[in-house]
Amino acid sequence: MPKVLGISGFYHDSAAALVDGENILAAAQEERFTRKKHDPQFPTNAIEFCLESQGLKVTDLDAVVFYDKPFLTFERLLETYLSYVPVGFPSFIKAMPVWIQEKLFLKSVIKKKLAKHSNLKTSELPELLFNEHHRSHAASTFFTSPYEKSAVLCLDGVGEWATTSAWLGEGNQLKDLWQINFPHSLGLLYSAFTYYCGFKVNSGEYKLMGLAPYGNPKYVDTIKENLIDIKDDGSFRLNLSFFNFMVGLRMTSKKFHKLFNREPRPAESQVTQFDMDLAASIQVVTEEIVIKLARTITKETGTKNLCLAGGVALNCVANGKLLKEDFLDGLYIQPAAGDAGGALGAALSYVYEYKKIPRTLKTPDNMKGAYLGPAFKSEDVEHFLKTTPAKYHHIGEDICKETAKHLASEKVVGWFQGAMEFGPRALGNRSILGDPRSSEMQKTMNLKIKYRESFRPFAPSILKEKTSEFFDLKDESPYMLLVAPVAESKRESLPDNYDELFGLEKLNTKRSQIPAITHVDFSARVQSVSKDTNPRYYELISEFNAITGCPLVVNTSFNVRGEPIVCTPEDAYRCFLATEMDTLVLGDYLLKKEEQSQEEIDKAKKRKFALD
């Protein structure tokens, strides 16, 4: 079987993935090693991890595949700038030196970096190939899905030219059906509102999604009448006069600002009801387009299975709405749906489409729970702890039972176990956990642990077999990519004036028996935990359930705002000290905050990250 390294990079979320035929061996984002969120640089550290984890060298590979075709991207940039002369000249001047010096000659850049890393001559390297961006996305989702045949829909900001693409996946092949090209992009439309509401593009889109339930979608007609023309089949065109992303250094134009009668919200300023209403409105428009496109592509392909990838596929609210549509029997979403997952797709595309290796279906999928990153043995953790002034306890096989007691007493726990997750979600191996029954847990974790905006919701991790008891969700949701309503039986009666409360005031109202994970619209981003996929995390939640009668915990990523998810025991220890976290669990070892050195805590708190 061919051993293939897929890589993505030079835009955002650089990553590497290693496959041996259809077996995914390892995958990780570069940011986890460099500690720079969304790091776009060549994924040197991620490549090193992938190879070393399997005892391989570059010369053992059959091929290296890049997830994108830079010449096509350069063609798009050049044509766009020429179309908007002279308006686009400033951004042309800014972009071209980078392209001429590096990106235009990416083949030689990649070869030089691989050769330097491996101490080889470029002539000794394996074959280097380039896959198209959206094909990499499509491959990442279909070839890891449990379907023999499926429609595939990819939605993002932009690849080389495509912003939306439709495919038919069957066996070990992908057939491209049609695409919508730049500058008409649902991803960029959503990012424009992300920018306008004061959040960072390519980083803050999930904040906009989390803000939406606080607002009323009163601007839906304004958006559809002015900014985007949506056809019945889901195809769309933007009114480009309202945007500036084609040639400028901002997402929106003065005409956009005039339409909504305000300049973009300054970053970190007060979020207003207006921002909440805009977020609610663009979310509704996004859901309409996604559902219409999905209906069209499944009808065209004659299949009721659908696979999703691309950054827009991380919109778990839209995914939850899509799941309820009767034209679908199966929905699969690549857990690393963004550009990081493109590295995996590029490698799998080589295996199946280029080498035509037969494909074996795996249930529930071929992603191994997304636990594909670095793992640390108990002796590694012990060795690290002995190099620090940390006070720690070796608990051993009772670690889940002891941790559950801490959670049941409303302590916030940093939980570090097994292999790191691939993709943007912490799925129980690099997680901060809490008691979902606590009315104060959401505020505590947002403000004292994550140091982030108070409106941000948290997700529940629930024992798989208990999911339908607490949520209106009959399907599995192993990757935290589906939002579902909290079950009626678990909700609390609301005050008569609840709907009249100002957005954030709704946070102070207890809405369910599990208030820490119940959003203001009674929704939750669910992770169903399987004993087969993550036995230790399953055991922990089971122990918590035995103590409390509650089969779920609050799960958020193990990091503070602006920092990537922790990778190593050292990262976890430093994050534990720098926050108000009560307990840290590293494998079989448990640390209590009150036992730690104040000097070490003060030192850790001096470390700062750029805000996301």
Image (cartoon, rainbow, N blue to C red):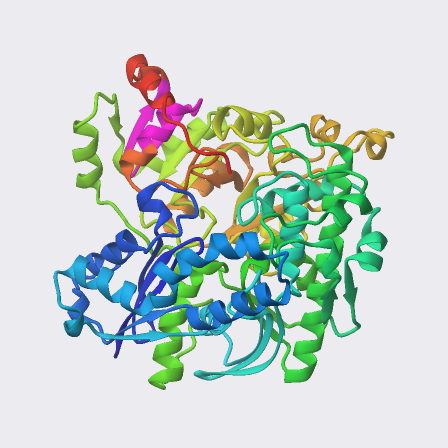
In the image, residue 588 lies in the stretch drawn in magenta? yes
Q: Tell me: 151 left or right of 104.
A: right
> Percent position (x, y) of residue 71?
43, 72
Q: Is residue 324 above or below residue 449?
A: below
* 555 with respect to 121 (left or right): right
Give residue 43's quadrant in the image: bottom left
Residue 459: which quarter of the image? top right
Q: Position of residue 519 (x, y in %)?
A: 67, 39
Q: Quadrant of the N terminus?
A: bottom left
Residue 141 in sight from this viewpoint = no
The spot of residue 4 in percent (x, y) is 28, 72
**Quick one: 329 or 347, which is closer to the camera?**
347
Q: Which residues are magenta?
A: 573-593
Q: Is residue 313 left or right of residue 67?
A: right
Q: Was residue 134 drawn as part of the magenta stretch in this picture? A: no
Between 465 and 171, the one lying in front of the other is 171
Which residue is found at the position 36% from the left and 83% from the top?
A: 354
Q: Nearer the viewer, residue 267 or 292?
A: 267
In this figure, what is the number of numbered marks? 0
